[in-house]
Amino acid sequence: MKTFLSILVVILSVGYSSLGQQSDWANVEKVFGKKGTIQDGVFKITFPRSDLKIKVGDFAVDPGLALTSWIGFINQSDGDMKMNGKTMMMGDLVLLEKEVGPVISKIVSLNLEVTALHNHLIGETPAIKYVHFSGKGEAVQLAEAIKSVISVTGTPLTSPQAPNQDVKPDWSKVEAVLGTTGKHNGNLLQYGFPRLEKLTESGMVMPPSIGMAIAINFQMAGNKAAITGDFVLLPNEVNPVLKALTQNGIAVTAIHNHMLYDDPRLFMMHFWAVDDPEKLAKGLKAALNQTNSKK
């Protein structure tokens, strides 16, 4: 009987905890006026820069390829990620250069933290910069703060209408090379390959969906595709991955950190290429093989 009651208490407590978290995220959604997603304990909401027309050379970059701002929230009651009753917020903002100064000033005024400022691409017009940020506190207050940061930019708060697409790209050869099915999103194919280590930031475990997975995105255009994303790497993996990408005709466009207190220390390597999709996939596979990631 005692065992039954113990199990019942656990079930009820988990149920109430889940309902509480859903309520928290519903209130966050109200702040932004749009729905988010929940994956491995992370609530995430995205803001594609559909207001921008960005090109790398002659290639028109889809917002979903490399131009989407995102915000992730980790509730204090998710697993072992406890932080004295607070929620942790992380993410990055896609900005025109003229927006960087106002955004940083706003972040500072709201007692949030800037964790990185840099490029992801090379040669894009107009030039784009990425501001990574973090904050700790009550979820709705954090949401209100970062929304006020976004308000000093031209970022649309509403989701763009999905384009009509009569012919969907055939990604079967790419998926065969990479050994797994990606997420199909219009003319995009998107992957996240989690690392196998336990990754922490400020002592909290960081799940893959809060920017800790190797991100690979394809955008089809005619019979070619563009690729970009970022490899999440340990220091000893940086040059082997760089070598694999370079030898396969994939340009490395940035190597940097996204966080301040990560353990183990992580480096993010961004890349770009336009070529035959299957050829690109083989180059990416060679680079993935140099990492301790789930493939």
Image (spheres, helix red, strand yellow):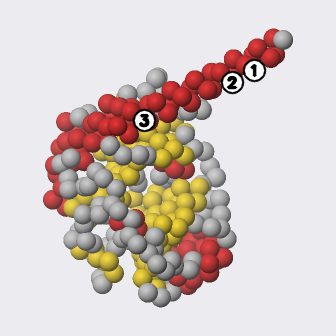
Residue at horizontal 45%, vertical 59%?
268
Residue in view at x 51 percent, y 77 percent: 168
- Amino acid under label 3? Ala
Mark 2: few/some/many CA within 10 Å (<14, 14-19, 20+): few
> Does residue 127 sit above or below 31 in this rendering?
below
For label 1, the residue is 7
Q: Residues within 10 Å of mark 1 (few under 14, many from 20)?
A: few
Q: Which mark is residue 11?
A: 2
Q: How many marks?
A: 3
Q: CB of mark 1 within 8 Å of CB of mark 2?
A: yes
Amino acid identity at mark 1? Ile
Where's residue 14, x and y in %? 63, 26
Q: Is residue 44 above or below residue 80?
A: below
- State the residue in front, 88 or 245: 88
Q: Marks 1/2: CA distance?
A: 6 Å
Q: Quadrant of residue 278?
A: bottom right
Q: Residue at x 57, y 71 (%)?
A: 287
Please state the horizontal and vertical placement of residue 27, each as a whole percent of the image. 38, 33
Asked if residue 32 is positioned above or below residue 286 in the image, the reply reads: above
| Residue closer to the observer: 42 or 242 | 42
Q: Secondary structure at mark 2?
A: helix
Lower position in the chain sequence, tag 2 or tag 3: 2
Residue in front for this viewpoint, 272 or 183: 183
**Where does residue 92 sit, x and y in percent of width and height?**
35, 51
Residue 244 in sight: no
Query: Earlier along the polypeptide chain: callout 1 or callout 3?
Result: 1
For the residues labelled 1 and 3, the Cα–Cα distance comes to 29 Å
Could you tell me which secondary element the residue under label 1 belongs to? helix
Identify residue for label 3. Answer: 26
